[in-house]
């Protein structure tokens, strides 16, 4: 997969070259280009923003900078899917993660200030698929952290990135539920023992216990996730809960 990021703070994306993502880049599983939006400015101040039409506080990012930047970065084959982080976007979910993981090219456009002039998004959408995406119901200062979140979530599903792909298949949201608790050695820590069943060696019992924990945790913390699942997602033991 090829990823391009446009930002006025390229250094903010440095963590993408560390740890799991960094290894994926080094191994050629992911290619990453971070572009400084100011390279497409035309004035001595390298301005990327201007005051909003209609008045109001804050500044808006200029279309005459973003337009040529996206034209150049999105050129080539295949045409990318453009992702524009914004709190006003569609929610970023595990479903979207899986969709993005099948794309050959993603371009991320990081907004700052009050965001990007809407015509940039509308214009790009005439030539490519464009998603305005929110990573949660809160407002960040800029899109860079949202891009880190999205790229890390997507990269886990690229072939070869995770040492053991089975671990991602068991994580929260893979079956629509939250994952239950995990334990490791020592067997007793601060007088808290590991649940007996996990030391029983009985894998059928362990699977059933994990499923029950996952259902109970989801019911307590995120009941709307259970409501969204079809009846066919539950077996007869689940229904007894
Ligand atoms: N005026 C915008 C609004 O109220 O919807 C908020 C702009 S925010 C201060 C600046 C930038 O941060 C946005 O353009 C976007 O790139 C990013 N951002 C902030 N919160 C975000 C979120 N929840 N999800 C994704 N991106 C976000």
Image: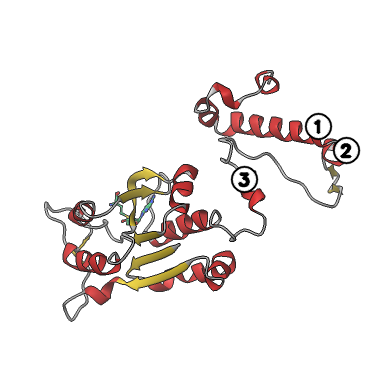
Look at mark 1 in the image and give the residue it sits on. 205
The 10 Å Cα crowd at callout 3, few under 14, some 14 to 19, many 20 or more, is few
The 10 Å Cα crowd at callout 1, few under 14, some 14 to 19, many 20 or more, is few
Q: Is residue 224 left or right of residue 220?
A: left
Quick check: marks 3 and 2 in contact, CB under 8 Å?
A: no
Quick check: marks 1 and 2 in contact, CB under 8 Å?
A: yes
Q: Is residue 142 visible?
A: no
Alpha carbons under labels 3 and 2: distance apart? 24 Å
Q: Is residue 190 visible?
A: yes
Choose top left, top right, bottom left or bottom right for residue 192.
top right
Q: How is the image coloured?
A: secondary structure
Which residue is at a point 82% across and 40% down the rendered structure image? 198
Alpha carbons under labels 1 and 2: distance apart? 8 Å
Quick check: marks 1 and 3 in contact, CB under 8 Å?
A: no
Look at mark 3 in the image and give the residue it sits on. 169
Q: State whether residue 240 is above or below residue 24.
A: above
Q: Secondary structure at mark 2?
A: loop
The percent position of residue 21, horizontal first and vertical second, equals 54, 65
Look at mark 2 in the image and give the residue it sits on. 200
- The first of marks 3 and 2 along the sequence is 3
The percent position of residue 121, horizontal first and vertical second, equals 23, 54
Which residue is at a point 34% across and 61% down the rendered structure image? 78
Front-lying residue, 172 or 101: 101
Choose top left, top right, bottom left or bottom right for residue 36.
bottom left
């Amino acid at each position: 997969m090829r990823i391009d990021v446009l930002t006025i703070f390229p250094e903010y994306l440095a963590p993408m070259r560390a740890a799991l993502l960094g290894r994926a880049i080094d191994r050629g599983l992911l290619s990453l280009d971070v572009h400084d939006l100011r390279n497409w400015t035309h004035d001595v101040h390298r301005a990327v923003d201007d005051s909003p039409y209609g008045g109001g506080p804050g500044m808006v990012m200029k279309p005459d900078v973003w337009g040529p930047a996206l034209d150049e970065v999105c050129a080539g084959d295949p045409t990318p899917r453009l992702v524009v982080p914004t709190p006003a976007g569609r929610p970023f979910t595990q479903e979207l993660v899986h969709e993005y993981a099948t794309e050959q090219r993603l371009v991320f456009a990081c907004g700052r200030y009050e965001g990007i002039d809407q015509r940039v998004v509308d214009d790009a959408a005439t030539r490519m698929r464009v998603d305005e995406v929110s990573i949660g119901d809160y407002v960040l200062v800029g899109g860079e952290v949202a891009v880190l979140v999205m790229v890390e979530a997507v990269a886990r599903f690229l072939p070869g990135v995770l040492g053991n792909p089975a671990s991602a298949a068991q994580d929260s949201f893979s079956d629509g539920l939250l994952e239950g608790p995990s334990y490791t050695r020592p067997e007793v820590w601060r007088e808290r023992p590991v649940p007996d069943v996990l030391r029983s060696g009985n894998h059928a019992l362990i699977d059933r216990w994990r499923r029950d924990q996952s259902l109970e945790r989801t019911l307590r913390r995120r009941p709307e996730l259970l409501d969204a699942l079809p009846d066919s997602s539950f077996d007869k033991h689940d229904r007894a809960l």
